[in-house]
Image (cartoon, coloured by chain):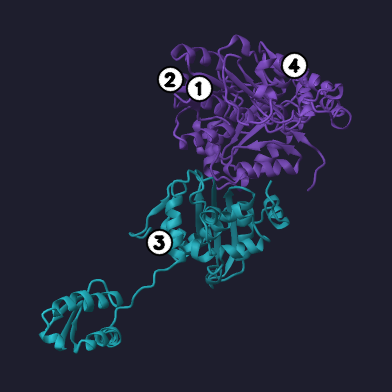
Amino acid sequence: MWNYTDKVMDHYRNPRNVGAIEDADAVGEAGSLSCGDMLKLYLKVDKNGIITDAKFQTFGCGSAVASSSILTEMVIGKHIDEARKITNKQIVDALGGLPPEKMHCSVMGHEALEAAIANYYNEEITIKPDDEIVCNCFNITKSFLENEIKNNNLKTVEDVINYTKAGGACGRCQGKIKEILENVNTPVKKEEKLTKTQQIIKINNIIEKYISPELRKDGGDIELVDVEDNKIKVRLSGRCQACNRSQLTLTHFVEAMLKEHIDENIEIIQV
Amino acid sequence: MTNSKLIYLDNNATTKVDEKVVEVMLPYFSQYYGNPSSIYKFGGRNSKAVQESRETIKDFFGAKNSKEIFFTASGSESANMAIRGILYADKSKNHIITTKVEHPCVLNLYKQLEKEGYNVTFVGVNSAGDLNIEELYDAVNEKTALVSCMYANNETGTIFPVEKIAEKVKSLNPNTKIFVDAVQAAGKIKLDVKNTQIDMMGISGHKFHAPKGIGALYVKSSTLIFPLVIGGHQENGKRAGTENVPFIVGLAKAAQLAQDNLNYEGTKVKELRDRLETGLLARIYNARLNSQSINRVPNTTNIGFEYVEGELILLNMDDLGICASSGSACTSGSLDPSHVLKAMGVPFTALHGSIRFSLSRYTTDEDIDYTLEKMLGIIEKLTKISPFQKELKELKQRKGII
């Protein structure tokens, strides 16, 4: 027995705005018969972009019908660009909440609204070339999951199932969902590419701080001559210059130090 | 929209406890509360009650000897005790054959056993719900420890020919043991294990008007099982724990009443079920009979309402006081629709809108009249919300209604 709010019960018992609009200005669809729920949303939009009428047809459970019904009430009277800002969370809030397992019903409402507005503007919704289907049971793409994870602050595989249904049937894609969750929730810090000047300053700082002091102990020193991409040109001076172990110092100490602090792929060239 | 009316058509989920059952149980709570293992007469009375109940359950199973009967707490426990018990007793074989449509309590155990290293063959069913029996026989080999098949399916009521299966399997490998989950058969059709090759059979009391929390397992005397619960000597050392005397007495009473009512189940209950089934199919153009097998328990029917979703149907039925259940994904929260209907290949159009009606000896003519009257309105209302108007219209035309 689901713990539905009075508002949800009212909307599935007496759904508002049921039916089709024959001369609709926008139609949006989400879900499918095989997935167990589907929603068709029809919008009538006037010349000023105001949604004057909205109707729906839903194949789905009580909360799917309630989500669709309340969505039509939410969009009527709004400018289409205002309606575009409606989130699935607002649908849930308007219903006074949904059981966690039923969150996907609000997501379906939001999806149908997005599709209808895209249809109004003649925007094509296509799967991006780098996108992929993650959940084959419900035909759900990676980019869709990433969006829902971000927008609804989803943390666990269970959250993803509740909101999107992905992973909720055969469960085979749950490992993949876990990966996507980790990637979205712990964004990789992208290293900005440094300019040459910044690179030189950075390398000089490391030389000053970690390398020179050690070489000076033995009466030698090192100076940076030039940087070309990953090639770092240096000149040894003082006693290092004449030392027959200078090559060892370069590879074992200088190169190791710079690799640790800058990049694994650098190369040291003695000039 | 509260409705005090209650039309209970979900008897495969659980049943009303018969008042005669409650009556015989009551003295064993505060009056005769002694421990059956005690030496004094006050305990001995309970020991006798348990023994008499075991005799009654023996007759209910159609078993030879009451020593072949073990009391458990549920159908699930009976299944676990039988399956694990037999596999522990003989670890030389690692292959199990079962069906794709077993109850989850059995199916999930086999999925667990797969993880523990057993090879499990899951045999399918045809579109009517009948077992692909040749597929089952083909799977039997010298490593087959166990063949496990339900007697009647909980969702469709389809009866599987377990006696025939047991006989054939034993002829293919005499060392293979047979377990039958008879939870949905008990009280609906006659059980008669003594003249079969079945080794073990489990039942659950609350499916035939005993309370929840009591079940029984039949284990043929020549079949050795290893106990799951180890402790005292109760249940012949196969299930430790002080006997649940009031519930055991209740189970026996319910079994005796069920036995007395078998004829009624097979005639009057069947007549009501058939009237409901044919009535729904005749009145509602998008109704489809999922349970098409001719071998069915008398109380069950499963009907798919095309292009309408099951939870929504149940919620609307509930508002009118009618209780049933659905194979829809949404009802359970699992997102996956019924594994039974999927195994049968029920089309997507009807899969999510499937409703199981299960009757009992308490179901009346008025209950069926009321349900028939209300279902038409519910399905008409919900069909109007469906986005598949074009498909529905075509369906209507195909059935020659327009």
Residue kind at label 4, given as amino acid type: Thr
Output the chain of dot 2.
Answer: B
Please give the letter of the chain rendered in purple.
B
First-in-chain label (1 vs 4): 4
Side of B321 where B86 appears, left or right? left
Q: Are marks 3 and 1 in contact (CB under 8 Å)?
A: no
**Mark 1 highlights which residue?**
B147
- The alpha-carbon separation of the residues under discs 1 and 2 comes to 8 Å
**In front: label 2 or label 3:** 2
Are discs 1 and 2 located on one and the same chain?
A: yes
Q: Quadrant of residue B74?
A: top right
Pinpoint residue A120: horizontal percent, then vertical percent: 48, 64
- Give SS at disc 1: strand
**In front: label 4 or label 3:** 4
For disc 2, the neighbor class at 10 Å (few under 14, some 14 to 19, many from 20) is many
Please give the letter of the chain rendered in cyan.
A
Q: Are marks 2 and 4 in contact (CB under 8 Å)?
A: no
**Mark 2 highlights which residue?**
B140
**Mark 3 highlights which residue?**
A124
Pinpoint residue A267: horizontal percent, then vertical percent: 18, 75
Pinpoint residue B138: horizontal percent, then vertical percent: 41, 19
For disc 3, the neighbor class at 10 Å (few under 14, some 14 to 19, many from 20) is few
- The alpha-carbon separation of the residues under discs 2 and 3 comes to 55 Å
- The alpha-carbon separation of the residues under discs 1 and 4 comes to 27 Å
Rendered position, A151 above or below B219: below
Are discs 4 and 3 located on one and the same chain?
A: no
Output the chain of dot 3.
Answer: A
